[in-house]
Image (tube, rainbow, N blue to C red):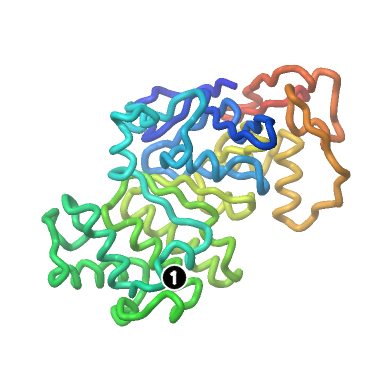
Amino acid sequence: MCIKMKKTNEYILYTKNLKVHFSRKRKVVPAVDGVDIFLEKGKVTSLAGESGCGKTTLAKAILGFHRPKEGGIYLNGSDITLNKNQSLIRKNIQIVFQNPFSSLDPRYSIFSSLYEALKVFPAKGGPASGGKKIKKSECKEAIIKALAEVELKPDVMDRYPHQLSGGQVQRVCIARSLLNRPPLVVLDEPTSSLDITTASKIMKLLSRLQKELNLTFLFISHNLKISKKISDHCFIMYRGQIMEHGPKELVYNNPLHPYTKLLKEASELKLKRLKGEDFLSQGCPFAPRCSFKRQECSQKLKQVEVEKDHFVSCYLY
């Protein structure tokens, strides 16, 4: 499904007809099925959808963990699905995972974990190295500064992950992801394993860092309410396809696709129990659950611009 975009040089990353398929019990599962998304430089783009819709698979394809079956992923104009361009991924894209404790080696102190990241990027060497290769004996200042950016005290670097709270460990993961000042950071549900109060603090921290460092974020979440708070543009994903996308105010305040409305109700704790669903091999993947289902819904999806920059793939429009 082709998504209308501006000039491609305005985006730090965009995908074209991206497909990632998996084989399961002699069947092909289209985890990402012809997705086009775009990330504007210096902005936060959110990718929202329920568990199993393909959000993390799409993120892992961008990071090079999954090999696409079809399509391209373009980082600053270079297709990073090609072997010759895959080195660009490590230099330009970092990720903060959902579970912070599984992201750090429990045998390493926080100092050692951050030092390992500094060694991977000797050319930049973190926020205090001046762009030179940094030795272990000289990196204390850089690590203290990195921890200060995420509002952690210097004594944290002598501790181990199990000696910190979930929020503190996630802050360490955020600090590690920003050591080489990557242009793009993927945030894969970074607050879903935290309590509400801690999650709110982490969201404020991410928003501040994004503005201060002029970063581009791909924020992945199942909660549309959280996506609205941090993002500039929002994509709604279901069964590997984009159902709707547009500026966050339009998508949240005026959801068009029935699935987007359902997702908004879920984030506001108004979700009713749903019946079981069947899988359609073509057409709208949400049709089996939709109360507005029509005969046309079994046909190939078409994207419609209902209002300026607000697109939806639904035969109701």
Nearer-the-camera pick, 8 or 295: 295
Q: Looking at the image, how many numbered discs can be counted on the residues? A: 1
Residue 182 coordinates in the image, percent (x, y)? 31, 48
Instruction: Say which residue appears at 85% left-offset and 28% top-offset.
Output: 293
Instruction: Say which residue appears at 68% left-offset and 31% top-offset.
Output: 26
For residue 317, say whether it is visible: no
Residue 155 coordinates in the image, percent (x, y)? 31, 82
Quadrant for residue 28, please give it.
top right
Instruction: Say which residue appears at 35% left-offset and 80% top-offset.
Output: 159
In the image, residue 293 above or below residue 253: above
In the image, residue 205 above or below residue 180: below
- Considering every residue shown, the one lying at the far front of the view is 26
Quadrant for residue 24, please give it.
top right
What secondary structure is marked by label 1? helix
Instruction: Say which residue appears at 51% left-offset and 47% top-offset.
Output: 231
- Quick one: quadrant of the C terminus? top right
The residue wearing badge 1 is: 169
- Quick one: quadrant of the N terminus? top right
**Residue type of the residue flagged with mark 1:** Val
